[in-house]
Image: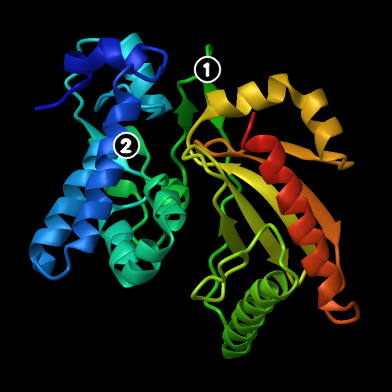
Amino acid sequence: METIAKHKTKLLSTYKQSQDSARIVASAKYLTRLALTADDVLIEKHLKKILTEVLWMLSEANGKYNTRYRSSEVVRLAKEEPTSKVKIQHEHVFPRKSVIEKILSQRQALLTDPNLLEEILDETVGCVVTEEQHKSLSKTEDGWNRYKGIEVLDMSLNPPLVMKWHWPISNPASAADQSKSSDTKLLQLEFWQRLSEFATSNKASIKPRPPTRGQYYCIIPIGRSDCHISLTILIKENQIGCQIYIPKSKQLFNDFYSNKEAIEIALEIKGLSWQDLSPKNACRIQALYKFDFENQQHEEAFIWLLQTASTFKAVFSKS
């Protein structure tokens, strides 16, 4: 039985990445890719079992009960009632079942685009809660939206920071809303396909591979595993963007930030945005550009995206 008393020291400790955590994460990701490529050997039952174990490996890479995120009630009990027999649970913020379904439903796309698989696996975050809190988590929401009414602490800081999320109000989408969403996805898919064709015909140094589905982002590898370029289009907001996305390394973001002035001079981009995306482990360095999708020629957007991505790659791949 896992209780406050049994793990009180770990529950009160400041979160730090262990020396072995990077190797554990890399090994788990490799195992995932290996399992997905063995579709002619593995039966689905065994594949799901492997993916389940992989998600445990990722969320427990630094230990089962000294995770970065812990409920304030767990920490309070460990401090004020160290002999408490209250049961605790290592919770997957994004439930394993939904993550596995997401992976299996996009299996071929993930094999084609390894960075997309990385993004999904990097959402594997553990949070320690009491057994009672675990039972109260929303069954209809996903991710941190399941934690309504539960105060969570970021234990990587000293003193710990109380995380605050603005919980969205869930309203069933109307048929009209669903239709608009479908139209937007088609526009996004067409945009990426045309961008890819434009890059090829103009012999651009950056050649984006269009996503296989209508999404707002397009990933471009830059020759390193700890970050990549992500091009974005926000049609409703009339905005396009180019960013360096760092899925799971605050240290890399801090290293870049320590050279902020030199990087911004090299990029020659005004208004660069440096974003720590806590409570996620991810960070990004983003440039945005106003673009009217209805009234401006798409070639203007293509040129800005390709030129900006080329500059980003030149600067960050060497940093």
The residue drawn where x is 64% and y is 82% is 190
Relative to 263, say whether 228 is above or below: below
From this viewpoint, is residue 61 visible? no
> Mark 1 to mark 2: distance in Å?
25 Å
Pick the quarter of the image with the N terminus.
top left
In the foreground, 198 or 25: 198
In the foreground, 237 or 116: 116
- State left or right for residue 210 relative to residue 152: right
The residue drawn where x is 41% and y is 17% is 16
- Tell me where residue 124 sits by quadrant: top left
Q: Residue furthest front?
A: 203
Residue holding disc 1:
157
Q: Amino acid at mark 2?
A: Ala
From this viewpoint, is residue 4 visible? yes
Task: Give the x, y percent position of residue 2.
Answer: 14, 26
In the foreground, 270 or 2: 270
Q: Nearer the viewer, mark 1 or mark 2?
A: 2
Q: Amino acid at mark 1?
A: Leu
Relative to 238, say whether 70 is above or below: above
Pick the quarter of the image with the C terminus.
top right
The residue drawn where x is 66% and y is 77% is 197
Task: Give the x, y percent position of residue 72.
Answer: 42, 26
Task: Give the x, y percent position of residue 11.
Answer: 31, 17
- State left or right for residue 291 relative to residue 143: right
Residue holding disc 2:
26
- Name the N-terminal-most of marks 1 and 2: 2
- State left or right for residue 110 relative to residue 56: right
Task: Give the x, y percent position of residue 224.
Answer: 51, 39
